[in-house]
Amino acid sequence: MIPHMARLHPAGKPDAASEDALHELQQAVKRYELIFQATNDVLYDLDLVNASVEWNEALYTQYGYGRDELNGTLEWWTSHVHPDDAFLLENKVSELFESGTHSWHCDYRFRRADGTYCYVRDRGLLQRDTAGRPARIIGSLLDITAQKQLDLAKDEFISLVSHQLRTPLTIIRVYGEMLTGGMSGALSIEQAQWVRNMTNSSSRLIDVVGAILNVSRLDLGRIRITSSPRDMRVLVQGCIKEVLPLAEEKQVLVGFSPPRRFPKVGLDETIFTQIVHNLLTNAIRYTRPQQGRIDVKLETRRDGYVLSVHDNGIGIPPDAEEHIFERFYRAKNAVGMEAQGSGLGLYLIKVMCDAFGGKVWFETGKGTVFYVLIPKRGMIPTGQ
């Protein structure tokens, strides 16, 4: 019952104040009804206790469903999520329930009445009961199919350009190395320095192009994830060995004490080693010369296997934390310290973790710790 609306006139009729309140309430309800009808977004009210859902009119007008096709259950909704996106959606909802936050969003494919799929952006707010248990989600589905198509076209273009750039850049680097190796005669000190600068710049650009190409392939779903039992300790040690020349150049120490016992984990070796390599080079790059220390750890947790890379570098400013995994983003303190970064390394790690059903996060303060979680079942192969 609405407060103060129960006040009655002695004769049993509502007083003037109650009538005014009732009129205001009726007007508010009408306004909300008009809002629900006017929006193109699908609005929903998900009762988690009863696993039931109420939808607004947009579900029928936007996606072609008849009212007789819906039974108002959560099962109907989940059965219309694309099978390849169902696990991602389940993980997102689980993270929401386990976290202390109330808002969430997730992009996935939703089936229309004609059997075709569209991309939707699901945004919701979680309500909890007095005991803190998830009770209700109220949210909306926004059709972002056109935006996704534009993104795919852009990524196709990036992929094409990246392929075209790699060959001439590689040729420049090879010829530069031939010159510095004296294959065309001795160079003066000044000439040798110029060629080294040219070769180093072309090598950095090749790395950037390679990162862009990998991002494009992941976004387009062209990297196939295959999983087989691997020893994470051996793979991590191999990655550390590869980056040691870079660490020694900056006089940065890299420490790794592998656990005596560690189970073999289902991994895509290429994906895993690229993640480790990106984390290590990132840590070396932003750790101060001659004072740097990087500690790498592997541990088993309840929900999976965690790799952590801890550096004593410059840390991540508070205003950069929410953007750190965005494409091409670099924090201001990182730009000031190191001019060679592309802003793609962490984004690439995030995309790869999402692709195989894992997770990446960080803690920062005096230095930064990046964590990567591999699920207990291992990396999920493409299509599962």
Image (cartoon, helix red, strand yellow):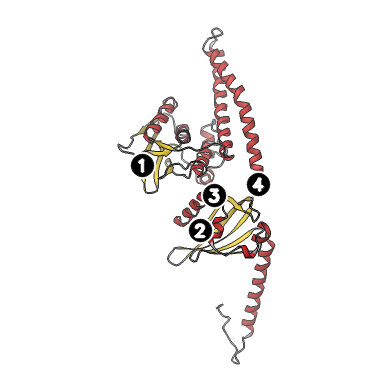
Residue with the mark numbered 4 = 147
Distance between the alpha carbons at the discs numbered 1 and 3: 31 Å
Q: Position of residue 189 (x, y in %)?
A: 53, 12
Residue with the mark numbered 3 = 83
Label 4 element class: helix
Relative vertical location of residue 151 with respect to residue 53 in this rendering, above or below: above
> As shown in the figure, which amino acid type bears the numbered disc 3?
Pro
Q: Is residue 311 visible?
A: no
* Closer to the camera in the image, 288 or 143: 143
> As shown in the figure, which amino acid type bears the numbered disc 4?
Gln
Pick whichever of labels 3 and 2 is earlier in the sequence.
3
Q: Residue at x 58, y 33 (%)?
A: 213
> As shown in the figure, which amino acid type bears the numbered disc 1?
Glu
Question: Which corner quadrant holds the N terminus?
Answer: bottom right
Distance between the alpha carbons at the discs numbered 4 and 1: 40 Å
Q: Residue at x 55, y 42 (%)?
A: 326
